[in-house]
Image: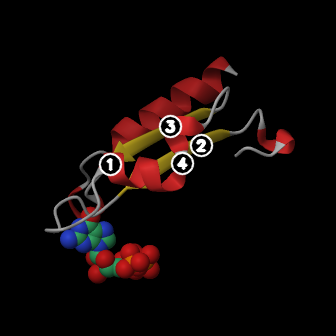
């Protein structure tokens, strides 16, 4: 995401399997990916439990809003 060619990219990251004991938290995933240090980039990390559908639409709603605004 730091590459100049990706300056207009929109990135949605799912931190999945939040129901699994010991799963990396959303904050841990974000830190591991270096998202907090990204400047001037459009990205969002959504925690989710894919098998139960939790968090999926929230992430897609964010993505949809960003793409519609672009
Ligand atoms: N408990 C739990 N299991 C999940 C979740 N999402 C996916 N799984 C399970 O994880 C297994 C692997 O799912 P895949 O869709 O094959 O994902 P993958 O990327 O190929 O494999 P992984 O790296 O294990 O996620 C399947 O048994 C899924 O049912 C979740 O949110 N919670």
The residue indicated by pointer 4 is: 34
- Between the C-alphas of marks 2 and 3, the distance is 13 Å
Q: Earlier in the sequence, mark 2 or mark 3?
A: 2
Name the element at disc 3. Answer: helix
Which of the two residues, 45 or 39, is positioned nearer the viewer here? 39
Q: Inspect this view and state whether residue 47 appears.
A: no
**Where does residue 66 sit, x and y in percent of width and height?**
58, 26
The answer to which image quadrant residue 37 occupies is: top right
Proximity of marks 3 and 1: CB atoms separated by less than 8 Å: no
Name the element at disc 4. Answer: loop
Q: Is residue 12 left or right of residue 61?
A: right
What count of labels does the image hold?
4
- Between the C-alphas of marks 2 and 1, the distance is 15 Å
Query: Closer to the camera: disc 3 or disc 1?
Result: 3
The residue indicated by pointer 2 is: 11
Residue at (24% x, 65% y) in the render: 23
Q: Is residue 6 above or below residue 29?
A: above
- Between the C-alphas of marks 1 and 4, the distance is 12 Å
**Looking at the rendered structure, which numbered label has been put on residue 26?**
1
- Where the C terminus falls, by quadrant? top right
């Amino acid at each position: 995401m730091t590459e100049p060619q990706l300056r207009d990219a929109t990135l949605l990251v799912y931190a999945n399997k939040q129901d699994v004991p010991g799963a990396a938290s959303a904050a841990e995933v974000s830190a591991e990916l270096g998202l907090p240090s990204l400047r001037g980039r459009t990205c969002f990390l959504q925690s989710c439990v894919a098998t139960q559908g939790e968090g999926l639409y929230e992430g897609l709603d964010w993505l949809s809003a960003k793409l519609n605004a672009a």
